[in-house]
Amino acid sequence: MNKFFVMMVAVSLATAALADQAAKPTAVGKKGRTPLMMSFSDLKWTDLPERKGMQFAVLSGDPKKGEYTQMRKVPAGTDNPLYTHSSELKNVIISGVWYTGADTASARDFGPGSIVLMPANWMHVSGCRAGSDCVFYQEGKGKFDFKPAAGVPAGK
């Protein structure tokens, strides 16, 4: 699958999410917000405080408060030990090989074009395989959090 096709899938998903947001009234009751259109190179990346080395670029919403869409970058070779998120997450892999599963032994690899939908409070491992950084589009149904399992260090 070529990178152009994968990027178009991610952009289509992001566009649908943004169009849905644009149709909703703003806080002051006005409709017709300006659509978001930017190239990947124009994204404003921020370090993810919960996970050293990971970055995000918010597209819509606010991951600290509620529903959001964002792009994520994860360094190659990153391993996340058992943890959960409080809300449902959808990831669309754009580049690299992302893995996830209920434990290390059952974790599966997901390459470009893959979609991973994780229910809220699902205990799992995840990470980016060595060789290439992972980039993916993420939708969160609520605020973003990273809750390591009891007694498990936060990982690298």
Image: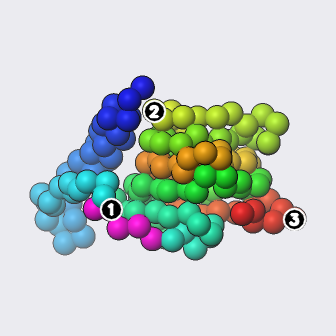
Horizontal and vertical percent position of residue 125: 73, 48
**Measured Cα–Cα span from mark 1 to mark 2:** 20 Å
Residue situated furthest right in the rendering: 151
55 lies above or below 8: below
Q: Are marks 1 and 3 in contact (CB under 8 Å)?
A: no
Residue 151: quarter of image? bottom right
Which disc number belongs to residue 22?
Answer: none
Q: Tell me the amino acid under the disc marked 2.
A: Gly
The residue that appears at 13% across and 65% down in the rendered structure is 30
Residue 148 visible in the displayed image: yes
Residue corresponding to mark 1: 43
Which disc number belongs to residue 151?
Answer: 3
Residue corresponding to mark 2: 113
Horizontal and vertical percent position of residue 145: 60, 64
Q: Tell me the amino acid under the disc marked 1.
A: Leu
Q: Is residue 1 magenta?
A: no
Residue extent of the magenta highlight: 42-46
Please state if 123 lies on the left or on the right of 50 as rendered.
right
Q: Nearer the viewer, residue 106 or 120?
A: 106
Horizontal and vertical percent position of residue 112: 48, 35
Residue situated furthest top in the rendering: 1
The secondary structure type at the circle numbered 3 is loop
Nearest to N terminus: mark 1 or mark 3 = 1
40 lies above or below 118: below
The residue that appears at 47% across and 47% down in the rendered structure is 136
The residue that appears at 73% across and 47% down in the rendered structure is 124
Badge 3: how crowded within 10 Å, few (<14), some, or many (20+)? few
